[in-house]
Amino acid sequence: ACTYVGQRILEGRLPARFRYTLWLYWIIILLFTSFLSMLTCVILKWVLIGKKRPGHVPSHLWAVFADWFVDYHFGLSLTLFDSFFENTKLVNIYLIALGMDVDFASHIWAVYFPPSKLDLISVRRTFFSTVILDVEHEGEYKKIEVMNSSVGYSVVVKAGAKIKDSQVPPLSIVNGTLNGLKSEIAKTPINYSTGLWCCLFGIVIIASLIVAFEVSEYNAGDPAGLGFSVTKFALVLVAQMTTWLSLYALLQRIILKKSCKDGWQSRSQGMYEAYMTITYYLVWRYSLLILTFGTPFMNLYLRCLGAKVEGRMYYFAMCSYDHPLLTFRNRTVVDRSVVSGHAVDMRGLHFGPSIAAGVLHAGVNIMANTDATGAKELGPSRFI
């Protein structure tokens, strides 16, 4: 419905003789659909759910349906938005519009904060990785409050939890009150540049779609033939995949720099957060690189990105970052794991070499300054 509204608004408003009118038309339609979907989600949240407060959890069918309906639409509205702006302050603005009590000094990923829970969550100057939030306990809504803290990967925060001045390690469960020591987290400056870099990278990525468009416009056979259409479609996919993988390799060389004093560093935190977004979405989700997993081509591409691959390796990772800092030992198997040369919390980014070896089972996260040489098996679900 959002796409149809966009088509009706845009109809007849683009130049007819411009070569890239069709390309521009669908880019605008996708952007407009994303914006309209987010706006619709905000309206649905306040109309169907309203504002939740601590207290009794309604169990009637309408309340359950409304929560599911809005949360489902919320997930759809993030499809394109997260691909470009996942690490920006636009996420905070979107969640504030949905009713969440969050400031601009906090880093959060919208996908882990569904509208059905937002009214019962308060976040101040906190870094969140992936998180599971539970706002219900024994038939009661209870508010979660987090302040001046850093919450690690896949932490479970139970209903009514209060976290203050704490660094919560990955894969932890927080229940009750957690008070740490006052730290420099409260003094960390707010970074607003990520949104700018995401916009610039987004423009470059969108412009790169012209390559696939040109291939699709080329006609050298029978347009009505099935063989021609299938071949043409395959060439479009190959052309776009090649363009994106080449573009990603170039962007990584620009964003990561090496100095004699500090080793590898990013040119700025804003650029690096944008780099993390395009790494996950552009390379690992949309480029079809997954079709090469477990093949020699994948190992070759990792070498082209700057990683050291010593001998044979089977690569089926969820994602990998900072490739010039990565080393994969001979006979390494990476199974749905994350391998990176950085560690990040509210204090900032920390870089260092990472060496992967042995069998990395699902859920393993190898981070900066890790040497797994000699390991036979690691994991599952383990931070190193």
Image (cartoon, rainbow, N blue to C red):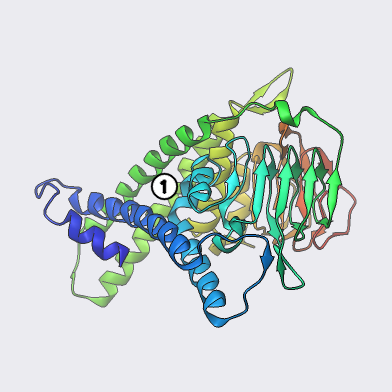
In the image, 7 versus 343, the foreground residue is 7
Quarter of the figure with the N terminus: bottom left
- Counting other residues with Cα less than 10 Å from the Cα at mark 1, is it few (<14), some (14-19), or many (20 or more)? some
Q: Residue furthest top?
A: 261
Count of numbered tags: 1
In the image, 287 versus 38, the foreground residue is 38
Spot occupied by residue 80 in the image (x, y as percentages of width and height): 43, 54
Q: Quadrant of residue 117?
A: bottom right
Spot occupied by residue 322 in the image (x, y as percentages of width and height): 65, 39
Residue name at image x 22 percent, y 56 percent: 218
- Residue 171 drawn above or below residue 261: below
Residue 329 visible in the displayed image: no
Residue name at image x 88 percent, y 58 percent: 376
Residue name at image x 30 percent, y 47 percent: 210
Residue 14 in the figure: left or right of residue 161: left
In the image, 23 versus 308, the foreground residue is 23
Amino acid carrying label 1: it is Thr
Residue 270 in the figure: left or right of residue 12: right
Label 1: element kind: helix
Residue 156 visible in the displayed image: yes
In the image, 209 versus 174, the foreground residue is 174
Q: Residue furthest left?
A: 17
Spot occupied by residue 175 in the image (x, y as percentages of width and height): 83, 57
Q: Residue furthest front?
A: 55
Residue 174 in the figure: left or right of residue 305: right
Residue indicated by mark 1: 243
Residue name at image x 79 percent, y 41 percent: 164
Spot occupied by residue 223 in the image (x, y as percentages of width and height): 18, 69
